[in-house]
Image (spheres, rainbow, N blue to C red):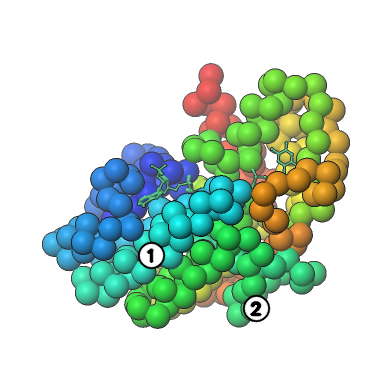
Amino acid sequence: MKILVTGASGQLGSTFKSLVSGGHAKDLDFVFKSSSELDITDFDEVRTELVSSDYAYCINCAAFTNVDKAEAENDLAYKVNVTGARNLAMNCNESKTVLIHISTDFVFDGFLNTPYLEEDIARPIGFYGDTKYKGERAIINNLEEHFIIRTSWLYSEFGHNFMKTMLKLGAERDELSVVYDQVGTPTYALDLANVVLHIIKAHSIEYGVYNYSNEGVASWYDFAKAIFDDYKIDIDLKPILSTEYPMPAERPKFSVLDKSKIKNTFGLEIPHWKDSLKVALKAYSKINI
Ligand SMILES: NC(=O)C1=CN([C@@H]2O[C@H](COP(=O)(O)OP(=O)(O)OC[C@H]3O[C@@H](n4cnc5c(N)ncnc54)[C@H](OP(=O)(O)O)[C@@H]3O)[C@@H](O)[C@H]2O)C=CC1
Ligand SMILES: Cc1cn([C@H]2C[C@H](O)[C@@H](COP(=O)(O)OP(=O)(O)O[C@H]3O[C@@H](C)C(=O)[C@@H](O)[C@H]3O)O2)c(=O)[nH]c1=O
């Protein structure tokens, strides 16, 4: 069974590569395409790749993910996150390929105080979240055979992410301030990739939108504290308000996802974020000896 991975050089794409090279996807024939090998904003390129081959699945790891830059680079963020998603959906429809697309907790405004369900109203407060939501709609409107998985606060030993930023800053500084009034759930990219593999191996036809994150709840401060404690970094870590850490894009204050649907549909047990963080830090330390 042939599987196309777009945006293959990013954090999640690299995680899939590591799973495949580690022998965790033995009967699956993965084809990895980085942005320079397949530009998802180019309809004809996408069409040529999908229609001339016999991909059973396309896992879309390609996205414009810089939340702050998206506020200034509206056109590019829209092109990648909306036009790119639509190009994939339209061509997957023609090539009879199931599209597995990754979306985000940032489609929500963060005004709820109980975990978000898939059917809760999406009302993004930033341009990144807005384009991700429009990308979801473009897929739903053009392709029935889709899985859209909304995840949150993705991190890993690969690419750019909060865990690696904290480890870098922790090595450079004696003190650091991190916001504690944004609450969500960190998600280890390897756990997400394994769930995607699980869905593929199950040949599921339960198409639709699903939430997936690790279990548990944290503020970014809690997440940073756990990173420093587990990695034994001695630093004076201060909890601050978002107003004390101004950024171009506003983030939702609360974006915990309810995972009942994905757990019940696929019989999953989801690791707690604190347990997965330990696994990720071990993997990171192996790469960065
Ligand atoms: N990171 C996070 O915290 C979260 C991410 N998500 C979602 O998860 C998915 C994966 O994220 P993650 O791996 O962290 O993101 P990354 O930014 O690490 O990777 C995205 C990849 O997409 C590629 N890309 C950009 N534009 C194009 C294009 N036009 N055509 C093809 N590829 C392109 C980038 O390539 P290049 O570097 O060459 O530009 C990059 O390799 C995304 O959909 C994201 O929205 C959801 C929740 C949290
Ligand atoms: C580096 C740093 C960040 N922060 C704050 C800023 C921000 O509010 C919060 C998170 O920082 P980041 O900018 O790294 O993360 P951010 O870009 O907000 O992460 C988001 O990315 C997109 C792609 C998603 O889809 C989301 O799920 C989420 O993971 O931590 C501090 O308070 N102190 C610091 O030293």
Q: Amino acid at mark 2?
A: Asp
Left or right: 35 with respect to 241?
Answer: left
Name the quarter where the N terminus is drawn: bottom left
Residue 83: mark: 1
Residue 133 at x, y percent in the picture: 53, 69
Q: In the image, is 275 to the left or to the right of 35?
A: right
Q: Position of residue 189 (x, y in %)?
A: 52, 48
Could you say whether the residue bearing mark 1 is in a helix, strand or loop? Answer: helix
Residue 177 in percent (x, y) is at 81, 36
Decide if residue 187 is in sight here.
no
Left/right placement of residue 263 relative to residue 274 reads: left
- 10 Å neighbourhood of mark 2: few (<14), some, or many (≥20)? few
Q: Residue furthest left?
A: 52
Q: Is residue 113 visible?
A: yes
Q: Is residue 22 above or below residue 12?
A: above
Select label 2 or label 1 by which is in front. 1
- Return the residue at label 2: 120
Disc 2/disc 1 C-alpha distance (Å): 24 Å
The residue tagged with tag 2: helix, strand or loop?
loop
The answer to whether mark 2 and mark 1 are in CB contact below 8 A is no
Residue at image position (75%, 62%) is: 254
Q: Residue at x 40, y 73 (%)?
A: 139
Mark 2 vs 1, N-terminal side: 1
The disc at residue 127 is: none
> Which residue is at the front of the view, 263 or 175?
175
Residue at x 69% of width, y 27% of height: 169
